[in-house]
Amino acid sequence: MLRPKIPTMPTPTGLASRPVVVEPTTVIQHTPTTPAPAAQAPSSRLAVQLTPGSVLALVGGGTAVVLVVGTVLVSMLLAVAVTAASVAVCALVIRSLVSSQHHR
């Protein structure tokens, strides 16, 4: 069922022909008869013009991003601090239980 099928090489049926040899040809340079285009004037770049409304929107968006990222980072720091405090309390309780059993 899972045996691979190995392809068999068919036997050649006809005579093999020799490859055709292609002789290299000479390359002739052709000079264009039309004159080269004149140098174009440099195109003026489009400058982004900010209106007071768009500046206000950019400032508001940037402030919102900073506040959201700050909130996320502070909440992650708070989560780490709470976890560290709870691990410390658990360690003190376990140490107290272990030391009280040795005294009895």
Image (spheres, grey):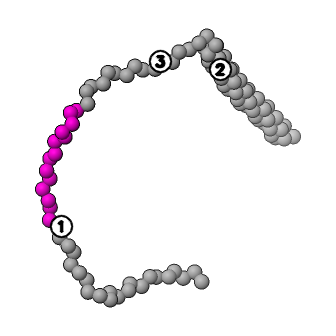
Query: Which of 50 and 87 lies nearest the eye of the viewer?
Result: 50
Residue 43: image quadrant is top left
Farthest residue to the front: give it. Answer: 34
**Amino acid carrying mark 3 in the image:** Ala
Label ID, residue 22: 1
Marks 2 and 1: CB-CB under 8 Å? no
Q: What's the distance in space between the residues labelled 2 and 1, CA to CA?
A: 68 Å
Please, is residue 16 above or below residue 94 in the view?
below
Q: What's the distance in space between the residues labelled 3 and 1, CA to CA?
A: 57 Å
**Amino acid carrying mark 2 in the image:** Gly
Please, is residue 31 above or below residue 49 in the view?
below
Res 5 seen here: yes
Residue denoted by label 2: 61
SS under mark 3: loop
Which residue appears at 40% of the width and 19% of the height? 44
Q: Residues within 10 Å of mark 1 (few under 14, many from 20)?
A: few
Instruction: Magenta stretch: give its range.
Output: 23-36
**Amino acid carrying mark 1 in the image:** Val
SS under mark 1: loop
Q: Is the magenta stretch mostly helix, strand or loop?
A: loop
Please, is residue 4 above or below residue 38 in the view?
below
Image quarter where the C terminus lies is top right
Q: How crowded is mark 3: few (under 14 residues within 10 Å), some or many (20 or more)?
A: few
Query: Which of 48 and 72 lies nearest the eye of the viewer?
Result: 48
Q: Earlier in the sequence, mark 3 or mark 2?
A: 3
Which residue appears at 51% of the width and 18% of the height? 48
Q: Position of residue 63 (x, y in %)?
A: 66, 17
SS under mark 2: helix
Label ID, residue 47: 3
Query: Which of 57 and 69 lies nearest the eye of the viewer?
Result: 57
Residue 84 placement, left or right of 9: right
Q: Which of marks 3 and 1 is nearer the N terminus?
A: 1
